[in-house]
Amino acid sequence: MPRHLSRPRHDGRRIAYLVLALGLVLLVAGSWWVVRNTADEKAAPAAVSQVVVSPSPSTTAALTTAPTSAPPSAIPSTKPTNPVTGRVDTLDGLVPDYVLPPIVDGLAPVLTKIPTEQKVVFLTIDDGAVKRDSDLALLERNGIKASIFLAHSIIANDPDFFLKYTAAGHPIENHTMTHNLGFIQLSYEAQKAEICAMADFEEQRFGRRPVFFRPPGGPYTQATRQAVAACGLKAIVDWEAKANAGGMDYQVGHGLRPGDIVLMHFRPEFPNDLGAFVNAQKAAGLKVVLLEDYLQMP
């Protein structure tokens, strides 16, 4: 057969071979794609479970603040309760290096500062004039327990409000019945009546008899020390540092020292005063603990 007549037959065969080869390639590629995707789907759950997502700063802040924005009673404590005091122990393993002196010759000891080199500080809050849940929540949010010195005449309109403080682990102490700023001018019997009556009231109302006494304004006499002991209390507690008007006042030095007892009040500026205290406490590297825990008072 002439060559020019046989060329179409050869060309057709070549085309057929090419089509067949292309089909085989496509078949192999398709099979490989199916196998690969099936394997990826099976492996996907394991891969996802290993992914760690780093939260943004705003997310981190939300995660940090959300639990503490709840009411104090809704914030569970992870620390064990001290079987002696019935409170969560603020010492957190710290062993105190100071023991409260005993009553000698019928006179209660006086504390203006705890003589210690341990990095601790003690917050005390007086009177009870301003009663706000937000102040208690602020203490809880900062992880601070304070000794609360209440005067009957100031809390008489709503004494049960402070049951929230005792429930949250803030012990209630004695600040007299009438908050008479001329307290030391009273006779021994009159001072004793003020102190004993308030101790009786607090024991009945709050379920715990106070162990510490703070005289209105701070001054005391030998008669005051005698009256405190006669009413069954263990010590007079004064201070050398004060959070006041959004700042800190120091009787000694220019900053908080280990063992300082700090005075605050339940006033409208409570948040600013607490902020000033927290800033000073952190700057000094001190741990806030309860006087009652450090001195092992029930």
Image: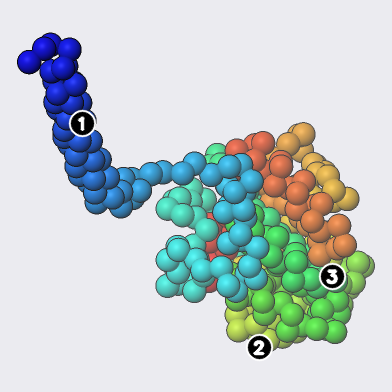
Q: Position of residue 16 (x, y in %)?
A: 17, 30
The vertical placement of 3 against 9, above or below, is above
- Residue sitting at 45 percent across and 50 percent down? 94
Q: Are marks 3 and 2 in contact (CB under 8 Å)?
A: no
**Neighbour tally class for label 3: few under 14, some 14-19, many 20 plus, Cα within 10 Å:** some
Give the total number of marks visible in the rendering. Answer: 3
- Disc number for residue 204: 2
The vertical placement of 278 against 202, above or below, is above
Question: Mark 3 or 1 closer to N-term?
Answer: 1
The residue labelled by disc 1 is 19
* Separation of marks 3 and 2 at Cα, in angstroms: 22 Å
Give the residue type at disc 2: Gln
- Residue sitting at 12 percent across and 11 percent down? 3
- Disc number for residue 41: none
Q: Position of residue 90 (x, y in %)?
A: 52, 58
Q: What is the quadrant of residue 205 in the picture?
A: bottom right
Choose mark 2 or mark 1, whichever is in front. Answer: 1
- Residue sitting at 42 percent across and 72 percent down? 83
Q: Position of residue 260 (x, y in %)?
A: 67, 46
Give the residue type at disc 1: Val
The residue labelled by disc 3 is 130
Question: Mark 2 or 1 closer to N-term?
Answer: 1
**114 or 293: which is nearer to us?**
293
Viewer can see residue 138: yes
* Separation of marks 3 and 1 at Cα, in angstroms: 92 Å
**109 or 217: which is nearer to us?**
217
Is residue 219 toward the left or the right of residue 166 in the image?
right
Give the residue type at disc 3: Val
Is residue 238 toward the left or the right of residue 43 in the image?
right
Viewer can see residue 233: no
